[in-house]
Amino acid sequence: MKTKHVSYLNNAEHKNILIRLEDWNEDYSFFKPFQKVVAYPISKKTKGFIKEGKPFRLALNFENEQEATHALNKLISNEATFKDYLSNIERSSHMFI
């Protein structure tokens, strides 16, 4: 797995939250390069192995690197939040953000 555009979210809701693009294409050929934005926000609920108040892996899936980079930049600049990208996040993760 490769990463790029590694940064941190810092706003009213998130403090020092790691966020980056991830490329899983070499391991899983069905993924396009850098089509995922991945962050590690603090969970707002507990369910299964994800615990309230603890960081968890949140993946936002896009069609291509350009869409993912655009979303990453909007998140970093505080022009968007994770909730603006619910359609790009697995439904099972919605409750934690």
Image (spheres, rainbow, N blue to C red):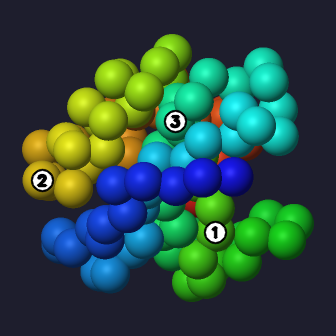
Pointer 2 residue:
77
Looking at the picture, which amino acid does disc 1 mark? Answer: Phe
The earlier-in-sequence mark between 1 and 2 is 1
Q: Quick one: 86 or 38, which is closer to the camera?
A: 38
- The residue lying at 70 percent from left, 41 percent from top is 24
Left or right side of 26 for 34 = left
Crowding around mark 2 (Cα neighbors within 10 Å: few <14, some 14 to 19, many 20+) is few
What residue occupies the far top of the structure in this picture? 63
Residue 33 percent location from the top left of the image: 57, 30
Crowding around mark 1 (Cα neighbors within 10 Å: few <14, some 14 to 19, many 20+) is some
In the depicted structure, whether residue 49 falls above or below residue 21: below
Pointer 1 residue:
56
Looking at the picture, which amino acid does disc 2 mark? Answer: Ser
In front: label 3 or label 2? 3
Q: How many marks?
A: 3
In the depicted structure, whether residue 1 falls above or below residue 12: above
- The residue lying at 18 percent from left, 70 percent from top is 11
The earlier-in-sequence mark between 3 and 2 is 3
Crowding around mark 3 (Cα neighbors within 10 Å: few <14, some 14 to 19, many 20+) is many
The earlier-in-sequence mark between 1 and 3 is 3
Looking at the picture, which amino acid does disc 3 mark? Answer: Phe
Quadrant housing residue 47? bottom right
Quadrant housing residue 84? top left
Pointer 3 residue:
34
Secondary-structure class at tag 2? loop
Residue 17 percent location from the top left of the image: 39, 74
